[in-house]
Image (spheres, grey):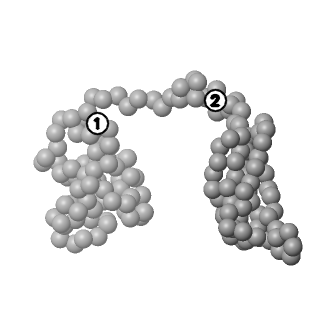
Amino acid sequence: MRLVNEIYLSTWERQHAYSSEQALDHMRQALLDRQSIDGLDELRAGLLINIDSEVLEQVERGEWWLIRAEADFGDWVMPARTLDQRVIELMKNPPVQPSRSPRIFRLVDSVTVEPLAQLSYLATVDGQSVQRRTDGEGIAHLFAPAGVQQISMKVIGV
């Protein structure tokens, strides 16, 4: 919405203007909610006494018109929001996601049975190697697909 002085009002804006009653209702609500409206500062600048009742009086007398936002869109038709049918079906029945179940191993010292915290290790899962580090309690978390055939771990630096 925006306010336009009647002097500068085009025929297009006149077609998309609120009636004086509707404009007063919208303006009252906007002034109560402290909403910003384009043109309101220009209207207030021309007033002798800058109070809300003077603003409403200008709109009521028809010296300033409240224009709908659609006036700025021209003749464009706003498209209705639609979702693709395939997207809707996927939202209703999402595809099965592959599960990644964690395999948890606790690495401990074989003599003292204390956890090997923050220790690097090399994990090989079905032929693919990756270097990792145990957590603060000596636990190694490996995420692998359900059908894993072989897991091997080699501790580095012990």
**Closer to the camera in the image, 65 or 104:** 104
User: Quarter-wise, where is residue 92 in the image?
Assistant: top right
The residue that appears at 18% across and 35% down in the rendered structure is 11
The residue mark sitting in front, 2 or 1, is 2
Looking at the image, residue 88 lies above or below residue 145: above
Tag count: 2
Please give the residue where the numbered disc 2 appears in the rendered image. 90
Label 2: few (<14), some (14–19) or many (≥20) C-alpha neighbours in 10 Å: few
The residue that appears at 27% across and 29% down in the rendered structure is 75
**Closer to the camera in the image, 87 or 66:** 87
Residue 147 x, y percent position in the rendering: 78, 36
The residue that appears at 35% across and 53% down in the rendered structure is 24
Placement of the C terminus among the 4 image quadrants: bottom right
Residue 79 x, y percent position in the rendering: 41, 29
Q: Which of the numbered marks, if any, corresponds to residue 73? A: 1
Residue 126 x, y percent position in the rendering: 71, 40
The amino acid type found where label 1 is placed reads Phe
Q: Going by the image, does 158 lie left or right of 60? A: right
Residue 69 seen in render: yes
**Closer to the camera in the image, 55 or 4:** 4
The amino acid type found where label 2 is placed reads Leu
Q: Is mark 2 in CB contact (under 8 Å) with mark 1? A: no
The residue that appears at 29% across and 70% down in the rendered structure is 51
Residue 102 x, y percent position in the rendering: 76, 51
Residue 92 seen in render: no
**Closer to the camera in the image, 75 or 126:** 126
Q: Secondary structure at mark 2?
A: helix
Q: Going by the image, does 143 lie left or right of 59? A: right
Q: Going by the image, does 64 lie left or right of 153? A: left
Label 1: few (<14), some (14–19) or many (≥20) C-alpha neighbours in 10 Å: few
